[in-house]
Amino acid sequence: MDALDFGTTVWVDSILPSLGGNGANTAYAIGTLGVPVVLISECGDDESGALCIKTLRKAGVDPWVKEDPSHPTATTIAIVNHRGERCFLHEPGVNRVAMPGPIEFAGTHGGGDWHYHLANPFALPAFRPFAAVSLKRARALGATTSLDTGWDSQGRWMEDLKDCLPLLDWLFVNDREAARLTGKTEAGQIVTALHRRGVGRLILKLGAQGCLFSDGDDREVVPAFVVDVVDTTGAGDTFVGGFLAGMVKQMPPLDAARFACAVAALSTTESGSVRGLRGYSESIEWMAAQDAAL
């Protein structure tokens, strides 16, 4: 639908439940692509939380998810127009109080090479003060690290994120979020400002234009794949999942970014945040088919 008209009844094409949340969508994408992944999170002790956990397990995710009997699972209504653009109505539920301390990583990884990805710390008000501490702990335990910013509904942006940035191997941020973080609007200026804040490598997500990769020395735009877009909900989250899965599978960063663009494109071809995703081999075959059609 394209507009809300209060006091009327509006018929829509479909209303359906879907997995949601930055971390859950990203973990689901990683699991679907055949990479072992643990999700540390919280949900309510309710039907919605149980369904999320079941959905994650089916995708191969190991959910270290605390079920809180005092607060409901966070719920979002995504209103999607005919162009696939979405507007969110969000009820934070348990996320208002979830994870009120630094993360304890004991038992969540098998040692050796592992990676800690922090998905949208802005969505967890009680966790915000402990985001940098958690990143430090992960690095001390031998992990590489990354963070996907998400949208800050409290408007604190750099005030809460600045201590995290020097602790990251990768920063993922979309263009609208990055503009709020840096006060800049031009992509080159945004990237320069974030590097000056201590970010080593980053990917600026540009939606239908793909992404901008930067490691401080080299910058390159990786174009998006052209698809018939149904729903862009979760595309940024699944992009990150695709990139991290590609890195685990030893892709060079630019190849991983292109693979991430493919994963994100596939996610937009069906309603809901993750229904359009495919397994790793199928995703690679889909990319090859798109290249052959050019």
Image (tube, grey):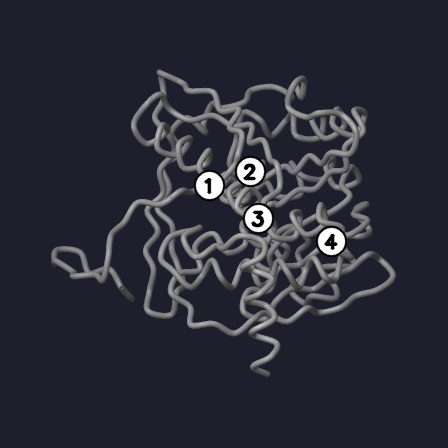
Separation of marks 1 and 2 at Cα, in angstroms: 12 Å
Q: Quadrant of the C terminus?
A: bottom right
In the depicted structure, whether residue 2 falls above or below residue 55: below
- Number of residue marks: 4
Please give the label number shown on residue 33: 3
Q: Earlier in the sequence, mark 3 or mark 1?
A: 1
Q: Which residue is mark 4?
A: 202
Hey, what amino acid is under mark 4? Leu
Question: Dot 4, crowdedness within 10 Å: few (<14), some or many (≥20)?
Answer: many
Point out the tag, 2 or 3, that comes first from the N-terminus. Answer: 3
User: What SS does tag 2 mark?
Assistant: helix
Give the CA distance from mark 2 to mark 3: 26 Å
* Percent coordinates x, y for residue 130 in the rendering: 65, 25
Residue 122 numbered mark, or none: 2
Label 1 sits on residue: 21
Spot occupied by residue 274 in the image (x, y as percentages of width and height):
44, 50
